[in-house]
Image (cartoon, rainbow, N blue to C red):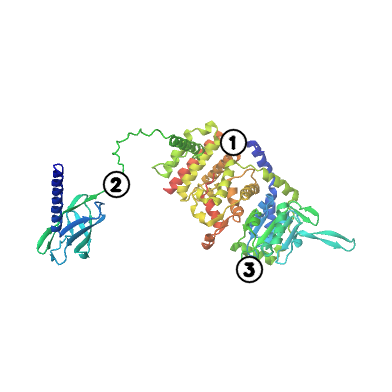
Amino acid sequence: MSVLRPRTWGYRLSLLLVCLLAGILVGKAQYLTLSTDRKDILLGEQFTLTIKLTSSPGKVVSGWPLVPDSLNHLEVVSRGTVDSVREGNKIIYSQALVMTGFDSGHWVIPQMGVKVDGKEITSASADINVQSIKLDGAEYNDVKEIIEVPPPGPEWKSILLYAFGTMLLLLLVYFWWRNRKKKPVGFKPVSKGTAYDDAIKALEALQKEQLVEKGEMKKFYSGLYDIFREFGSVVSAKSLMQSTTDDVLISMKGELEGNSFSKLAEVLRISDAVKFAKYGSSKDEARESFIVMKDSIDQLNKKKA
Amino acid sequence: MITNAEDIKLLNERIQQAAGFVERIESEISRVIVGQNYMVSRLLVGLLSNGHVLLEGVPGLAKTLSIKSLSQTIHAHFSRIQFTPDLLPADVIGTMIYNQQSGQFVVRKGPIFANFVLADEINRAPAKVQSALLEAMQEKQVTIGDTTFKLDEPFLVLATQNPIDQEGTYPLPEAQVDRFMLKVLIDYPSRSEEQLIIRQNMLGATSTPINQVASIQEIQQARSLVRGIYMDEKIEGYILDIVFASRQPEKFKLEKLKPLISYGGSPRASINLALAAKAFAFTKKRGYVIPDDVKSIAKDVMRHRIGLTYEAEAENVTSEHVVEEILRTVQVP
């Protein structure tokens, strides 16, 4: 018997505790709960907050919690109506609110209250995590250290291309320089002076080159002829560089007096013969031609003045 | 081959002697024809350079008379073919006819067998007749039946075209016009020349017989001399500049001509310009060519070798204008 006594006391104590708990539960027949369908959302994602009141039939429910549009960093997107369902000898009131959050963090939905038969019943608070990125338990890596990259080396392809291009350009310049049209010997038309000054300067330059002494008659007569055509272009107000000997003489007819015209014609014909028929003009003839040409230019200049 | 100044001098002297007939011919023709010196000088260039000549001018400008007179001055065989729409190639080159007496087919040579052939109004005959003539011009021979006949030398075709009344004509294709060395435009005589023409006609001077003043042998000899006339490299460059300016005007500061030209002078233009310049130098009794020779003859050589665009036609620009502009712009050496 002494063995059974402690068992009996333990049994009785357990039964008493069960009865006490059952009494508490039966005593708490009305209760209010707040629940969310998700615990974690991303910024702007939506979740549903359900406010649920469990009560007994015949009890008067008043002061249903009014949730403001903004609530502790959370926003109400839409709110459903308060619905009631009878389950056995219980009646359940519930309202669903769709909410969202635009600030990341852990936010608490504060406890709410409702009156049942004039008696205030409060709920526990609910909470929600609003995250900027999804933290779904996947493996995350630390931010890597800056990796040092060696500076880029010389690009041989570009270097070769540039070298080839430069060589091609130099070759082109060289060929242009070699094949460029040589200016008429002895004539340098660029001057700030008058056409007459230019012509006289060109004649002096031609003389300085001593082409007659060197026997380069073709160059000498070409130069002499072009100097006169350039000057004649100014006097006759039309380009004589595109004119033949006959054209030049027609332009000069009436401009030169006495036998100057026939002398000029003679020099121009000698020029043609030297230039186009390998005529070997003597040095004296060349010097005489130079004088005639200079006289013609002088005379034309005087007439123009 | 001319290599030095002495050769040119000798050639010059030979030409001064050989070219004496030029003045004689010109003077003999001027007895019956007043004015038209330009046409006569171009006919002589054609004759000396063995090139055919296309004459364009309104009727009544003494085209036929000039050619006939030229043939008479050298006592050459002259024939005239009036081109009509119903003309057949056989009417030009000849045909085989049946001889009843011998019972055989014999060759009847056509009027093309002459030294000077005047193809009057060449654009009035259909293409097949034009082709027959132009082929003979090119080949200098004619095939009748199975036999090929060489045409006599000198052989010079002088064709005429009427610039007005183009209805019912067959314009010569560009490729065939190119075979004419020169295209000469004949203009009306001056007032004083026309007065003289009236007076000569009243006196009956046009029926004055033309005397022979040169021989065919002289012409043949002159032709060989013409080919040997010295042409400097600078003159060749000038000729090339003129021809190339007709092909690529923008390279000669002639951008404004670019939209007006559909095609420029062919290499045949360069060859003919060089040859005609030499012949022109010969008529001036020179053994070498100067830029004046090239410029004087350039229009006649180039005007029918430049194709114009529709834009040019709309602007009333002729090939004559284009050549003039080229000659005004290309620098003379």
Q: Residues within 10 Å of mark 3 (few under 14, many from 20)?
A: few
Q: Name the foreground residue: B326 vs A193.
A: B326
For badge 3, the amino acid type reads: Glu
Q: Name the foreground residue: B211 vs B273.
A: B273
Image mark for residue A280 = 1
The answer, for residue B31, to whether it is visible in the render is no
Could you tell me how far apart the alpha carbons at marks 3 and 2 are, in whole angstroms? 96 Å
Q: Earlier in the sequence, mark 1 or mark 2?
A: 2
Q: Residue B202: which quarter of the image?
A: bottom right
The answer, for residue B95, to whether it is visible in the render is yes
Whether callout 1 and callout 2 share a subunit is answered yes
Question: Residue farthest to the top?
Answer: A214
Q: Name the foreground residue: B213 vs B229.
A: B229
Q: Residues within 10 Å of mark 2 (few under 14, many from 20)?
A: few
Name the residue carrying label 3: B167
Image mark for residue A136 = 2
For badge 1, the amino acid type reads: Gly
x, y percentage for residue B148?
A: 79, 53
* Secondary element type, mark 2: loop
| Residue at x 15%, y 59% (from the top left corner) | A29
* Secondary element type, mark 3: loop
x, y percentage for residue A299?
A: 46, 45
